[in-house]
Image: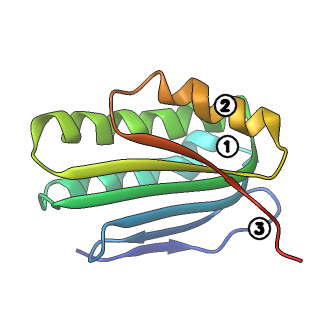
Amino acid sequence: MNNYFQEGNLNTPRIKLDATSGLLIFFGRSIPENPIKFYEPIEKWFKKYLQSNPSQIIFQIHLDYLNTHSTECVLILMKILESYYKSSKADVKIIWNFDEDDEDMDDLGKDLSTLVDIPFETIEVFEED
C-alpha cells in the first residue's frame, strides 16, 4: 500500500498518510473551493488502507480553520475509522490538536468527539518562543 502525501497551501491542509506506521496527519487550513473533490481521493485511500487490516491507527488533525463542508468531509473520514474500530481489534485513536487559546477549534474538536464512538483526544498546542 502506498503512502499518500499532499502539500498544503493557503486553502488546503498538508496531508500525510503513512500506511506503514498508521499515522494519518492533517495540518493547516481546510477551505478548498470544492471540498468533496479535494477529500474524495483521501476517502478512497482510507477505505483501501483499512482493507489491509492495520493494527494501529492514529488520525492526528491540527487545523487552524475548516469550513462547514470540510468539517463534513473530515467527519466522514472519522466515521470510516469508527466503523473499522468497532469491527476490528485495532488500536485506533483520533487526536484533535488546536492552537493555544483557539476556543472555536477546541469546541469543534469536542463537538466532533461526541459524533464518533472512538478514542478521541483534544490537545491544546502551545506556540514555542
* Position of 10 relative to 78 (above/below): below
Q: Quadrant of the C terminus?
A: bottom right
Q: Amino acid at mark 3?
A: Asn
Q: Nearer the viewer, residue 57 or 66?
A: 57
Residue placed under numbered mark 2 in the picture = 108
Residue ID at (82%, 43%): 102
Q: Nearer the viewer, mark 1 or mark 2?
A: 2
Q: Amino acid at mark 2?
A: Leu
First reached walking from the N terminus: tag 3 or tag 2: 3
Disc 1 is placed on an element classified as: loop
Could you tell me how many numbered marks the image carries?
3
Give the CA distance from mark 1 to mark 2: 21 Å
Residue placed under numbered mark 3 in the picture = 9
* Residue 77 horizontal/vertical position (percent): 42, 41
* Label 2: how many Cα within 10 Å (few below 14, some 14–19, many 20+): some
* Residue 72 horizontal/vertical position (percent): 56, 30
Q: Nearer the viewer, mark 3 or mark 2?
A: 2
User: As drawn, is 55 to the left or to the right of 16?
Assistant: left
Disc 3 is placed on an element classified as: loop
Give the CA distance from mark 1 to mark 3: 14 Å
Residue ID at (83%, 62%): 10
Classify residue 117 by image quadrant.
Answer: top left
